[in-house]
Image (spheres, coloured by chain):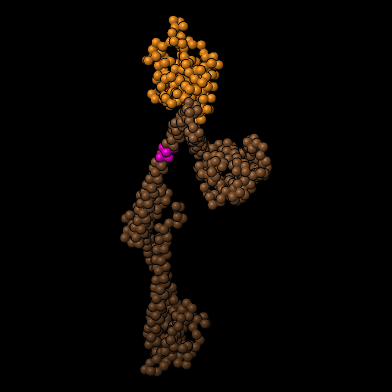
C-alpha cells in the first residue's frame, strides 16, 4: 500500500514543476507530491479514475493549482471541486504567474484558500513554496477525509 | 406662423370698391354740373323767346298807350305757373303795365333796367326791348322762378345715386370674383407655408398657383422647399452615417480595449514565467556548478540573474502603468496636505540617516482619486529624495499656488538636476536621464505621474539645471 501523498501539484510547465519540486525538496516535502499536468488529470486523480483508477489514499492535504493549463484550466477545476461535496473542503492554493485582478477576484469568488503570485526572483520563489508546503502539508490540519473507503484504510 | 389679422381678400375688395365708388361719384358730380349748366341755357333761351313774342304783341298797346290792352296781353302769362311777374315800361322807362295787375312794390323794378338776362337768387330775369320798325317803344320785363331747374337737379341726383348704388352692387360682385382669382393662389401659398412651418413637412408643394407673379413666387417657394427637403435628407443621411460610424468606432475601441486587456494578461502571465525559469535555473546552475566555475563564469551567471530580475521589474511596472490608464477613477475630496505628510513620513524611513530638510507649504483640498494622487506624490517625492542623494544637505520643498483657474503643485529639490534640453523626455515610459547604475529605477514613475495627472485633466512639466536641482510641477483644474 502506497502512502498517501499529501500534496497535489497541478502544473503544466516542466520548468515550473522542477523549480517547485526543488523548493519543496529543500524542505524534504518532495516525496509527498503528486504532479499532474492539467486540470483533467487532476480531476482524474481526485476521483480515482483514468490513470489514477485504483490508486490508494483519499484527498490530498492541499492542491497547488496553476491557473493556465491545457484542457481543464485551474479556475474550471476549482469550480468543479467546490461544486462537488467530496472535494468542497479540500484546501486549494492558486500558485500562478498572473497578478491580474480579475484572476484573483475570480479565484476567491470560487472559494480558493490562498492566492500566491510566483515571484520572478528564485530566492523569493523558493521561500514562497517552502512556506506554502510547510504550512498546508505540515502545519495545517486537513479536513477529515470522508471518501476514504474502510477497506483502503 | 400666425394667422393674419386682415385677409388679403378683404383688402382687395375694399380697394376695388373704394376705387369704383370714387370714380362713380366724380362722374356723377361732373354729369350733374354739366346738366345744370345746359338746362339753365335752355331756360334762358325759352324765356327770351317768350319775351320776344310778348314784346311783339305789346307794340300796339305801347304805341297807342293803352295800358288795359297791355295788361290783358301780360295776363296771358298766367297759364304758365313758372311766371312770377312781368312788367312793361314805356320808352321813357316808366312802369306801364304789370302782371299780375296788382303787384306789391319791389317785385318788379319801378323803372326799366338794362337789356339782357340774369339769375337772381331763385329767379331768372329777362329784360327785352319792345320795338317796331326800328322805333323803340319801351321795355318788357319777365321774371320766372327756377323750380324746373331744382326739379331737374333733384332728378339728376336721384339718377346718379341709383347709378352709383347699382354700380356698387355690380362692382362688389365683380371684385369678389376678381379677388378670388387673385387671392386664391396667394391663400394657397400661405396655407402651404403655414403647414410647412408648423409640421416641418418639406414634401408639401404650392404648385398650380397660376401664371402671374404669384405663380412665380409659388414656383420659387416650391424650389426652395425642394432644396430644403434635399438638404434635410442629406443631413439625416449624414447623421445616420455618423451614428453608424460612431457605433463602429466604439465597437472597434471596445475590441481594442479587450485586446489590450488580453495583451496585458498574457504579458503578466506568459512573459513572467520564462523569466522566472531563467532566474531559477541560473540559481540552480550556480549552486551545482558554481564552485567549478571561474570568477568570470560566476559573474556571467550573476548578470543573467540580474537581467532577468530587471526584466521582471519592467514588466510589473508596465502592467501598473497600463492599469493606471484603464482603471476607473474614484473622485472624492483629497486633503493634499495630509496626503503629502503621510508620504513624507514613509519616505523618511527610507532616507535612513541622511540629512534631509522637508519644507511643506500650504496645500489645499482637491477633487481626485486618492490612491492615484498618492502615487503621484510618492513618485515625485521619492524622485526628489533619490536625486538629492549625493548632496550633503538635501532640501525638498512642496508648494501649491492658484493660477489661471488651476492649482499648480511644485516639488523642488537641490539634487543633481537635469539637462533642460531633455526635459521633454522626462515623462516618457522607461525614459531616464541618468545611467541606471548611478540611480536605480526603471523610469516608469514620471510616466505614471503624467498619466494620472492628465486623467485628472491637468498638465505636468519640469524645470532643472545640472547639479543645481530640479522642480517638477503638476496642475489640477479647479
B337 or B38: nearer the eye? B337
Color of chain B here? Answer: brown
Span colored in magenta: B252-258
- Identified at 48% across, 80% down, the residue is B120
B254 or B94: nearer the eye? B254
B423 or B108: nearer the eye? B423
Q: Position of residue B68 (x, y in %)?
A: 44, 86
Colour orange, chain: A
Q: Position of residue A118 (x, y in %)?
A: 49, 27
- Identified at 35% across, 58% down, the residue is B220
Q: Quadrant of the N terminus of chain A?
A: top left
- Identified at 39% across, 83% down, the residue is B48
Q: Main secondary structure of the magenta part?
A: helix
> Does residue B260 sit above or below B125 in this rendering?
above
> Does residue A125 sit above or below B246 in this rendering?
above
Quadrant position of residue B411: top right
> Does residue B461 sit above or below A17 in this rendering?
below
| Count of picture labels | 0
The reply to whether residue A32 is in sight is: yes
Amino acid at each position: 500500500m502506497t502512502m498517501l501523498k499529501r500534496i497535489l501539484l497541478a502544473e503544466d510547465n516542466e520548468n515550473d514543476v522542477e523549480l517547485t519540486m526543488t523548493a519543496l525538496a529543500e524542505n524534504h516535502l518532495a516525496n509527498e507530491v503528486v504532479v499532474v499536468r492539467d486540470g483533467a488529470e487532476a480531476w482524474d486523480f481526485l476521483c480515482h479514475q483514468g490513470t489514477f483508477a485504483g490508486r490508494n489514499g483519499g484527498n490530498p492535504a492541499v492542491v497547488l493549482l496553476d491557473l493556465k493549463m491545457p484542457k481543464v484550466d485551474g479556475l474550471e477545476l476549482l469550480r468543479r471541486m467546490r461544486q462537488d461535496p467530496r472535494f468542497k473542503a479540500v484546501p486549494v492554493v492558486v500558485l500562478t504567474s498572473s497578478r491580474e485582478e480579475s484572476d484573483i477576484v475570480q479565484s476567491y469568488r470560487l472559494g480558493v484558500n490562498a492566492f500566491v503570485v510566483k515571484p520572478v526572483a528564485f530566492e523569493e520563489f523558493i521561500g514562497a513554496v517552502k512556506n506554502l508546503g510547510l504550512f498546508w502539508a505540515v502545519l495545517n490540519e486537513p479536513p477529515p477525509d470522508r471518501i476514504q473507503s474502510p477497506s483502503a484504510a | 406662423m400666425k394667422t393674419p389679422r386682415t385677409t388679403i381678400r378683404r383688402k382687395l375688395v375694399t380697394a376695388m370698391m373704394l376705387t369704383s365708388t370714387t370714380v362713380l361719384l366724380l362722374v356723377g358730380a361732373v354729369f350733374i354740373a354739366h346738366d345744370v349748366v345746359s338746362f339753365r341755357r335752355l331756360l334762358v333761351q325759352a324765356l327770351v323767346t317768350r319775351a320776344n313774342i310778348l314784346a311783339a304783341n305789346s307794340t300796339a298797346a305801347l304805341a297807342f298807350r293803352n295800358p288795359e290792352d297791355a295788361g290783358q296781353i301780360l295776363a296771358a302769362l298766367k297759364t304758365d305757373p313758372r311766371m312770377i311777374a312781368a312788367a312793361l315800361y314805356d320808352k321813357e322807362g316808366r312802369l306801364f303795365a304789370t302782371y299780375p295787375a296788382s303787384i306789391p312794390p319791389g317785385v318788379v323794378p319801378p323803372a326799366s333796367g338794362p337789356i339782357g338776362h340774369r339769375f337772381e337768387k331763385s329767379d331768372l330775369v329777362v329784360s327785352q326791348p319792345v320795338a317796331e320798325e326800328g322805333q323803340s317803344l319801351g321795355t318788357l320785363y319777365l321774371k320766372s322762378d327756377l323750380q324746373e331747374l331744382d326739379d331737374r337737379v333733384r332728378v339728376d341726383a336721384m339718377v346718379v345715386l341709383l347709378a352709383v348704388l347699382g354700380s356698387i352692387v355690380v362692382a362688389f360682385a365683380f371684385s369678389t370674383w376678381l379677388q378670388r382669382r387673385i387671392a386664391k393662389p396667394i391663400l394657397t401659398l400661405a396655407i402651404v407655408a403655414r403647414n410647412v412651418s408648423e409640421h416641418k413637412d418639406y414634401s408639401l408643394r404650392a404648385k398650380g398657383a397660376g401664371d402671374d407673379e404669384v405663380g412665380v413666387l409659388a414656383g420659387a417657394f416650391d424650389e426652395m422647399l425642394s432644396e430644403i427637403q434635399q438638404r434635410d435628407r442629406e443631413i439625416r443621411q449624414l447623421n445616420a452615417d455618423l451614428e453608424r460610424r460612431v457605433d463602429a468606432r466604439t465597437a472597434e475601441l471596445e475590441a481594442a480595449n479587450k485586446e489590450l486587456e488580453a495583451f496585458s494578461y498574457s504579458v503578466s502571465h506568459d512573459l513572467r514565467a520564462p523569466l522566472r525559469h531563467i532566474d531559477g535555473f541560473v540559481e540552480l546552475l550556480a549552486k551545482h556548478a558554481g564552485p567549478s566555475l571561474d570568477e568570470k563564469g560566476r559573474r556571467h551567471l550573476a548578470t543573467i540573474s540580474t537581467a532577468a530580475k530587471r526584466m521582471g521589474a519592467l514588466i510589473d511596472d508596465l502592467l501598473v502603468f497600463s492599469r493606471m490608464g484603464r482603471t476607473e477613477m474614484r473622485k472624492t475630496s483629497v486633503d493634499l496636505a495630509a496626503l503629502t505628510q503621510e508620504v513624507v513620513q514613509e519616505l523618511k524611513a527610507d532616507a535612513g540617516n541622511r540629512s534631509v530638510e522637508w519644507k511643506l507649504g500650504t496645500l489645499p483640498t482637491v477633487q481626485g482619486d486618492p490612491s492615484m494622487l498618492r502615487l503621484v506624490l510618492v513618485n515625485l517625492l521619492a524622485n526628489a529624495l533619490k536625486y538629492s542623494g549625493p548632496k550633503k544637505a538635501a532640501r525638498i520643498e512642496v508648494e501649491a499656488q492658484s493660477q489661471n483657474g488651476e492649482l499648480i503643485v511644485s516639488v523642488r529639490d537641490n539634487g543633481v538636476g537635469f539637462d533642460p534640453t531633455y526635459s521633454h523626455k522626462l515623462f516618457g515610459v522607461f525614459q531616464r536621464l541618468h545611467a541606471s547604475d548611478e540611480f536605480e529605477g526603471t523610469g516608469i514613475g514620471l510616466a505614471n505621474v503624467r498619466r494620472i495627472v492628465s486623467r485628472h485633466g491637468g498638465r505636468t512639466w519640469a524645470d532643472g539645471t545640472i547639479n543645481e536641482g530640479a522642480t517638477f510641477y503638476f496642475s489640477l483644474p479647479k
